[in-house]
Image: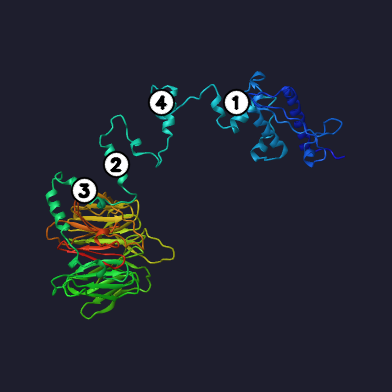
């Protein structure tokens, strides 16, 4: 007959030990108690069932009758009268763990490495087992550990106070905390309830312009420069839609608008209104034609027209920049379009375009900036290419008083101010598979945003305005930028002078990127910029960040977001074109 395995020997030893333990406890003397409801189970004799054979004891009586395991009633045993185990020690639980480890049932690697533990022989091993595997077992120790906090050394704190401070320091601030829980209650600010009520009214994404009426009512009589702001607000509040026509009757483009502007025409009493869309169409509306709503649409590019501009020397030519990597020239007299610039080797689209006198500037999606003479179309030799960013340039602006200074916004979460007179080799750009050698300009200033910056514009007072996915409108006062000296080893950091909360996170299907744009030559000498609002409004701010207009709204026939908007260069007329091509003209 084969010798039993070590596992079988260990199992038999465990059975005998448990049997002796049950005999020592004398469970047969326990009777039914009305308080505990415990009744000892009788043995069941069933030699024919296979289940009973699983519990067959080789050391049973001569009849070979299987003995069914008797469940031990735990409440009837007071262990503290027999040994020094704690009152909360569950011997049944540890016996079950021991049985599972021996029988191979639910045998974990952790218990297998520790091996069988005999709790009846040495209490030290049981204490070690509790410290390792029983949760919160160390809390039953009589001796408390000494708390040591680096910030509390040398201070008159007892152990209880130090432990309480440690527990408080371990509390993590989560979004579930209330605003009032973060403010000291010793000297409570009387305005705290007002702040709480105000925060409750703010949605997850909101704009300051949504509370224009409340701001006007609160600022009345409290602002030192309120008279000027009040006059502007009254002026813009009196603006009405053109001839009372609804925007659905003035559809200037066939698709979502990308850009719009007032185009000056010498022989007309009113400037033309132009807008481009994602299909490459350029829509033109003549407000001077009062007889009918005349709209003219021309297909100039196979892809979207991101920007367009004109030269002051020839108002009949409109230069259009497109995502198809080309710049075109549209002649208003001949109604013809020709290619001005195209590069078959560069497949990155053009994002923005500006013209100063006879010089054209445009930026591309690959982070490059182009400067060329409009009198020499398609001349690669006269074209200057500068590497300004590693990623897409979302917009740029030239200093109105000196075109040598340039501000760019990009997907790199940066706003940079450049001096185009300092040109040097670009040693920081590297792109896999690209062997082109680029030059770059001297960077004077930089502003780092936590998210991408969508657009930047520059006014006559040396102010920059930016919008971005951080849901903010930032105003920067550069003052006299000519006094800033270029340093190749140091770049000055910018910080916004005014920050306005504004919901700028647009969707491709909802609206185009919201672009704040300054008024070029205001007759009233007040700097103003306009930006669209995702709640279907047009917001106008002055150079100090005061909101002076809140035009439109769903209740005023504004059926879509006027993502492309502009303010007249001289007067205070306002236009906006929505995602459906509807024109909103306030004059």
Q: CA distance from mark 2 to mark 1?
A: 50 Å
Q: Quadrant of residue 324?
A: bottom left
Q: CA distance from mark 2 to mark 4?
A: 42 Å
- Mark with earlier residue (3, 1): 1
**Image coords of residue 148 (percent x, y):** 45, 27
- Mark with earlier residue (2, 4): 4
In the picture of the structure, the residue carrying the numbered disc 4 is 153
**Image coords of residue 120 (percent x, y):** 69, 25
Say above or below: 547 vs 34. below
Q: Nearer the viewer, residue 341 or 128?
A: 128
Residue lying at the far bottom in this picture: please name it: 334
- In contact (CB < 8 Å): disc 3 and disc 1: no
Residue lying at the far front in this picture: please name it: 34
Q: Nearer the viewer, residue 475 or 530?
A: 530
Residue 88, label in figure: 1
Residue 197, label in figure: 2
């Amino acid at each position: 007959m084969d010798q039993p395995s070590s596992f079988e020997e260990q199992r038999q030893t465990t059975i005998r030990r448990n049997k002796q333990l049950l005999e020592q406890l004398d469970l047969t003397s326990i009777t039914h108690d009305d308080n505990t409801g415990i009744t000892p189970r009788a043995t069941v004799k069933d030699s024919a069932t296979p289940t009973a054979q699983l519990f067959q004891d080789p050391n049973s009586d001569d009849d070979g009758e299987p003995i069914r395991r008797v469940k031990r009633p735990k409440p009837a045993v007071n262990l503290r009268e027999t040994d020094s185990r704690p009152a909360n020690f569950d011997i049944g639980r540890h016996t079950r763990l021991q049985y599972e480890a021996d029988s191979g049932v639910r045998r974990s690697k952790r218990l297998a490495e520790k091996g069988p533990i005999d709790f009846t022989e040495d209490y030290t091993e049981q204490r070690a087992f509790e410290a390792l595997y029983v949760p919160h077992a160390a809390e039953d120790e009589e001796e408390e550990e000494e708390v040591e906090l680096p910030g509390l050394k040398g201070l008159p704190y007892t152990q209880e106070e130090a432990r309480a401070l440690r527990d408080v320091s371990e509390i993590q601030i989560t979004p579930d905390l209330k605003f009032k829980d973060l403010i000291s209650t010793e000297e409570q600010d009387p305005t705290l309830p007002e702040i709480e009520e105000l925060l409750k009214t703010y949605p997850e994404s909101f704009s300051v312009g949504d509370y224009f009426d409340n701001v006007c009512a609160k600022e009345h009589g409290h602002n030192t420069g309120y008279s000027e702001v009040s006059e502007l607000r009254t002026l813009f509040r009196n603006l009405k839609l053109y001839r009372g026509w609804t925007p659905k009757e003035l559809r200037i483009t066939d698709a979502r608008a990308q850009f719009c502007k007032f185009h000056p025409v010498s022989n007309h009493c009113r400037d033309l209104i132009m807008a481009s869309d994602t299909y490459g169409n350029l829509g033109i509306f003549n407000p001077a034609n009062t007889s009918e709503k005349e709209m003219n649409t021309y297909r100039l590019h196979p892809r979207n027209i991101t920007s367009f501009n004109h030269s002051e020397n020839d108002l009949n030519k409109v230069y259009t920049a497109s995502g198809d990597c080309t710049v075109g020239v549209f002649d208003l007299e001949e109604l013809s379009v020709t290619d001005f610039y195209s590069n078959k080797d560069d497949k990155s689209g053009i994002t923005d375009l500006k013209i100063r006198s006879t010089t054209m500037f445009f930026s591309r999606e690959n982070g490059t900036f182009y400067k060329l003479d409009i009198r020499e179309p398609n001349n690669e030799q006269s074209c200057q290419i500068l590497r300004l960013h590693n990623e897409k340039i979302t917009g740029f602006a030239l200093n109105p008083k000196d075109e040598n200074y340039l501000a760019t916004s990009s997907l790199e979460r940066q706003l940079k101010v450049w001096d185009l007179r300092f040109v040097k080799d670009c040693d920081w750009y590297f792109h896999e598979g690209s062997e082109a050698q680029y030059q770059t300009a001297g960077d004077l200033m930089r502003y780092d945003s936590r998210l991408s910056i969508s657009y930047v514009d520059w006014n006559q007072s040396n102010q920059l305005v930016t919008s971005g996915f951080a849901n903010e409108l930032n105003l920067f006062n550069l003052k006299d930028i000519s006094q800033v000296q270029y340093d190749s080893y140091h770049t000055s950091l910018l910080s916004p002078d005014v920050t306005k909360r504004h919901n700028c996170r647009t969707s491709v299907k909802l609206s185009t990127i919201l672009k704040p744009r300054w008024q070029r030559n205001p007759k009233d000498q007040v700097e103003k910029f306009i930006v669209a609002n995702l709640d279907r409004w047009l917001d106008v701010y002055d150079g100090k960040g005061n909101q002076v207009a809140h035009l439109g709204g769903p209740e005023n026939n504004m059926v879509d977001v006027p993502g492309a908007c502009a303010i007249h260069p001289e007067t205070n007329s306002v236009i906006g074109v929505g995602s459906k091509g509807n024109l909103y003209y306030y004059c």
